[in-house]
Amino acid sequence: MALKRIVILISGGGSNMMAIVRRCAEEGWPAQVVAVISNRLDAGGLALAAAQGIATRIVPHCAHATRDAFDEALAQTVDSFVPDLVVLAGFMRILGAGFVQRYAGRLLNIHPSLLPAFPGLHTHRRALAAGCQAVGATVHLVTPTLDHGPIVMQSVVPVHPGDDERTLAARVLATEHVIYPLSVRWFVQGRLQIEGGLVRQLDCASQVLM
Ligand code: GRF
């Protein structure tokens, strides 16, 4: 059977992207990361992907006058790789409804909070200010609403006395490197089913990392 084609969108260091690339190769998923695309020229993950022999492209958001024009240019670049799955991994641009609908059901995102709590930016700062005793990360299918959509998997990370934004972000990121590759593997293996806006793992594997 043909390998599922994964395109990953990044804006920064690309540690989640690399976690997916490594696990895909190590575990022999029925998939291949065919391209890594960034909206930023200086995204550190681009060089990491290129070093793995993965095609890289830059679609700079500042080169486009409107959000729609950027979304269209990005979609054309994504489509040139004929993806089965598009993975947002630290992609820091809000995508319009047209883009999201184009990849409906095959667009994944990771967000560093226990959604539906704290969509948007500065999640760890806001969780600390709210006195949360646990934080975490969420992998979800993308809908046109920001940081919203059927939840594939979550990680739960306890808040320790003395934690600050930096220590929490580091502990949560380490869990992202576990739950994102696992979620992508389930997707490419066809082990996820969406029913009534909820995601079921067909082997009844746990969808939470504690
Ligand atoms: C991660 O915390 C992710 O949840 C958020 O941006 C960060 C990206 O990190 N959306 P990296 O580029 O994968 O290292």
Image: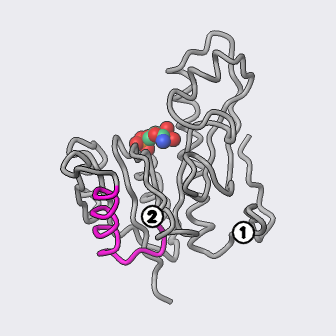
Residue at 46 percent across and 70 percent down: it is 102
Q: Which mark is residue 46?
A: none
Amino acid type indicated by mark 1: Ile
In magenta stretch: residue 94: no
Does 31 appear above or below 170? Answer: below
Mark 2, residue position: 98
- Left or right, 31 with reference to 178: left
Residue 125 position, x and y percent, is 56, 20
* Highlighted magenta segment, given as a residue range: 68-86
Q: Secondary structure at mark 2?
A: helix
State which mark lies toward you, 2 or 1. Answer: 2
Q: Which mark is residue 194?
A: 1
Please identify the residue farthest to the right as the structure is shown: 204
Residue at 57 percent across and 50 percent down: it is 145
Residue 82 position, x and y percent, is 37, 78
Does 40 appear above or below 136? Answer: below
Amino acid type indicated by mark 2: Gly
- Left or right, 42 with reference to 137: left
Of callouts 2 and 1, which one flags the residue occurring earlier in the amino acid sequence? Answer: 2
